[in-house]
């Protein structure tokens, strides 16, 4: 699933490609996604101009001149493609085409776990799935004290807590593993046992990791590609993710003794860490 860096990269690419153009047509080939596309979606967006772009956690928001907003979530395997014109033949899983003055946005989603919907812009914060979102990883209100408070009743592994979008929004499996490595915290540590100082280190590590991933255009491992079809490059900077048995970049211990980076499964998700450095 695209995480914060990938979603931010996609949002910026869409903004750069089609800018503040007017939506002229919408073609829906498949409306049964994670939730059905609203019956009045086309009526609410055709003829409106895109006036601004934003990101809420892993949602891309296109705000329109008619005071409606398009809300887009890419799910597990969704991607947005940009074409100069409507293709003569759509690719398999091209579910929605949004035709603008400056290009066509195509939503392709093999697994159909994503969603695209719309609502009045001033009602965005009232949507149930928006109300459940925690603070964004870059929100100034996200502080070590906030984390300490949210963690105090969590006697489960910190890695699981970092994936809870109601606490910190935008972090997924890749960046949770990488941030914990940089903070030198084991993914197995119970969240409520982290000190305020460790919460501070973790927050710094989260933001450092996400910023580096943003600069690299995200991580391409399986499904993720930028709208122009190119790949992100942060996977080449991963320290522990998907590196089972390899030495971590900052560890000088004997690989024969430690076995290198370990893979464990927490709450059904693979986690990677260095048992020597992460305690």
Image (cartoon, rainbow, N blue to C red):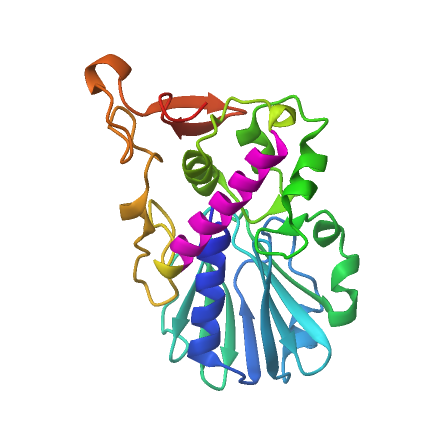
Query: In the image, 130: left or right of 105?
Result: right
Where 17 falls versus 96 (above or below)?
below
Q: Which residue lies most toward the front here?
A: 197
Quick check: 52 above or below 243?
A: below
Q: Taking the image as drawn, is residue 29 in sight? A: yes
Q: Give the side of residue 206 with respect to residue 49, left or right.
A: left
Q: Quadrant of residue 122?
A: bottom right
Foreground residue, 62 or 232? Answer: 232
Q: Please state the horizontal and vertical placement of residue 65, each as a whole percent of the image.
A: 67, 83
Residues in magenta, as a range: 195-214
Q: Please state which of residues 256 and 53 is positioned toward the viewer in this rendering.
A: 256
Q: In x, y percent, where is residue 238?
A: 32, 42
Left or right? Give the position of 4 relative to 193: left
Front in this rendered view, residue 149 or 48: 149
Q: Main secondary structure of the magenta part?
A: helix
Q: Residue 42: which quarter of the image?
A: bottom right
Task: Report the residue at 39% width, 29% height from top.
Answer: 272
- The quadrant holding residue 181 is top left
Q: Would residue 93 be seen by someone viewing this image from the given angle?
A: no
Q: Residue at 26%, 23% (x, y): give it.
A: 245
Any magenta on residue 4?
A: no
**Which x, y percent locates residue 22?**
56, 85
């Amino acid at each position: 699933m695209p995480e914060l860096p990938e979603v931010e990269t996609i949002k910026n690419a869409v903004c750069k490609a089609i800018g503040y153009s007017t939506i002229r047509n919408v073609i829906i080939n498949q409306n049964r996604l994670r939730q059905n596309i609203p019956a009045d979606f086309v009526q609410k967006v055709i003829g409106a101009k895109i006036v601004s772009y934003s990101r809420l956690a892993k949602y891309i928001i296109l705000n329109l001149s008619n005071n409606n907003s398009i809300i887009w979530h890419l799910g597990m395997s969704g991607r947005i493609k940009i074409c100069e014109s409507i293709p003569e033949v759509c690719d398999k899983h091209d579910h929605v085409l949004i035709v603008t003055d400056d290009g066509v946005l195509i939503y392709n989603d093999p697994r159909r776990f994503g969603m695209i919907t719309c609502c009045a812009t001033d009602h965005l914060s009232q949507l149930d799935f928006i109300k459940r979102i925690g603070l964004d990883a870059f929100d100034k209100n996200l502080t070590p004290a906030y984390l300490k408070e949210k963690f105090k009743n969590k006697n489960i592994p910190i890695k699981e807590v970092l994936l809870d979008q109601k606490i910190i929004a935008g972090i997924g499996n890749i960046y949770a593993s990488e941030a914990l490595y940089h903070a030198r915290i084991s993914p197995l540590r119970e969240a409520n046992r982290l000190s305020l100082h460790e919460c501070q280190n973790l927050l710094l590590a989260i933001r450092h990791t996400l910023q580096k991933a943003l600069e690299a255009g995200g991580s391409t491992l399986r499904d993720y590609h930028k709208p122009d079809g190119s790949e992100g490059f942060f996977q080449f900077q991963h320290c522990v993710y998907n590196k089972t048995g390899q030495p971590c970049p900052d560890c000088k211990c004997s690989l024969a003794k430690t076995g290198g980076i370990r893979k464990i499964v927490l709450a059904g998700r693979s986690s990677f860490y260095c048992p020597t450095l992460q305690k």
